[in-house]
Image (cartoon, helix red, strand yellow):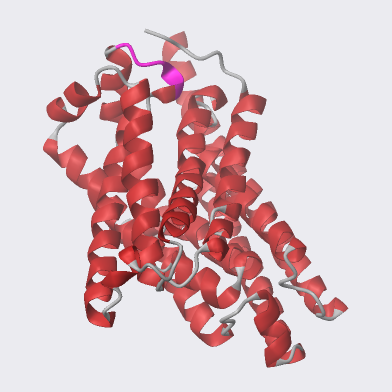
Amino acid sequence: MDSVTTNPALGMIICACGGFAGAVFALPFKKVKGWAYESYWLIYAIFGLVLFPWALALATVPNLGEVLKNAPGSVLARCAGFGALWGLGGLTWGLMIRYLGIGLGLAIGCGLCSATGTLIPPLVTGDAAALIKDTPAIVTLVGVIGSLIGIIFVGLAGKSKEGELSEEEKKKAVAEFDFKKGIMVALFSGIASAGMNFGLQSGGVLEQAALGGGTAAKWQGMPVLVVVLFGGFIVNAAWCLWQNAKNKTGGDYCKGANPVAGNILFAGLAGVIWAMQFVCQKVGEPALGKDIAYISFAIVMGASIFFSTLVGVIVGEWKGVSAKTKGLLSAGVVVLLVSFCVMSYANKLRNSEAAVPAAAEVQK
C-alpha cells in the first residue's frame, strides 16, 4: 500500500491550486458563441462531472470497479445524494456569475458555501445546541458569523457598484449584470453547494477500500469524487435537457451557423477546470495529514474568493467604481479569509481536546 509523506505546506498549496481552478473555470464560457445557457452548461457537466473525473479515477484507482461494487449502498446513496444537493446549487452557479460577474458572484457564493457547510449538519440532525456546547464550537460559530459579515460587505460593494455605474458601464464587464437577480441566485447556490463537501467527507469507506486495493494514497479520494459528481450530473443534465426542450434550443449542438466544435471545446474545458478544484482538495488532504485535513475545503473556498476577486479586478468588473466601493469589497474579502482561518483554528482546538482524554487513557 502506497503512502504519502505528510507535508502540510504542500497540501495547502495543492488545495489553493484547487481554489484557483474554481475561480477561473468560467472564463472559457466567454468564448462560447451563439448557444443558450442550458446548452453549454450541459457540455460543461458532461466533461466536468462525468468524463474527466471517471477518466482520472480509472487511471489512478486500479480496483475502481471493485471498490464501487462492494461499497455499502447507504454510503453510495449518501454521497450521490449530497452530490445531487450540490447539483441544485451548482446548476445556478453559472447564473450567479452571469448576473454578478466572477469577482462578486464567487465571493458571495463561496462564502455562503463555507458558512453553510459548518451550520447545516447540526441543524439538520437536531443538535443545534452543539453549536455552543464548548470552546471549539463557539469559536467555529464566531467564524461562521464572520463569514456572514464578510458576505454582507461584499454584497454592499455590489449594491454600491450598481448605484455608481451606468447600465452601459456595468454591461461592459458583465453583459447581464443584475444585482437583485444575482443576489437571490447566489443565496440559493451558495447554501445548496455546501452539499459537495458533505458528500466528499462521507465516503471514508470507499477511500479505505481503494487504499486496500493498491491505490496510491494521494488518489484515494477519487472513488468518492466520481460518486458525488455523478449525483450532481443527474440533476444538471435533467435540468439542461428540460430547458433545451422548453426553449427549443436542442438544435444548438448541431447549428452550422455557430462554431459547434469550438463551443464544445470551451464548454468542456470549463468543466474540466471546475472539476480540478475538488480533485486538488482530495489529493491535497493526505499531504495535509489527518490532524488538519479538515481545513482542505476552507482553503479551497478561501483561495477561490481571493483569486476570483483578483480575476474580477483584472477583467474590469470593478473598473470605474469609487474608493468606497473598493473599500467595501476589500473589507469583505479580508473578513471572509479571516473567518476561514478562525473556523480552521476551531477544528484544531477540537482535535486537541479530543487528543487529551486519549493520551490520559494511554497513560493509565
Q: Quadrant of residue 225?
A: top left
Q: Which residue lies at the image location 84% right of the left edge and 81% below the top edge?
A: 322
| Res. 225 in view | no
x and y percent of residue 28 in the render? 55, 57
Q: Which residue lies at the image location 63% right of the left edge and 56% below the top edge?
A: 305
Answer above or below: position of 30 versus 216.
Answer: below
Q: How many marks?
A: 0
x and y percent of residue 98 in the render? 53, 73
Of residue 141 and residue 217, the one placed in the foreground of this image is 217
Answer above or below: position of 3 versus 129.
Answer: above
Of all residues, the one furthest to the right in this rendering is 323
Answer above or below: position of 112 versus 328.
Answer: above
Q: Which residue lies at the image location 40% right of the left edge and 73% below the top edge?
A: 36
x and y percent of residue 229 in the render? 32, 46
Of residue 44 and residue 228, the one placed in the foreground of this image is 44
Residue 217 among those drawn in magenta: yes
x and y percent of residue 3 in the render? 46, 11
Residue 227 horizontal side relative to residue 256, left or right: left
Residue 13 among those drawn in magenta: no
Q: Main secondary structure of the magenta part?
A: loop
Give the quadrant of the N terminus. top left
Give the quadrant of the C terminus. top left
The residue range painted magenta reads: 214-218
Q: Which residue lies at the image location 42% right of the left edge and 18% below the top edge?
A: 217
Of residue 211 and residue 288, the one placed in the foreground of this image is 211
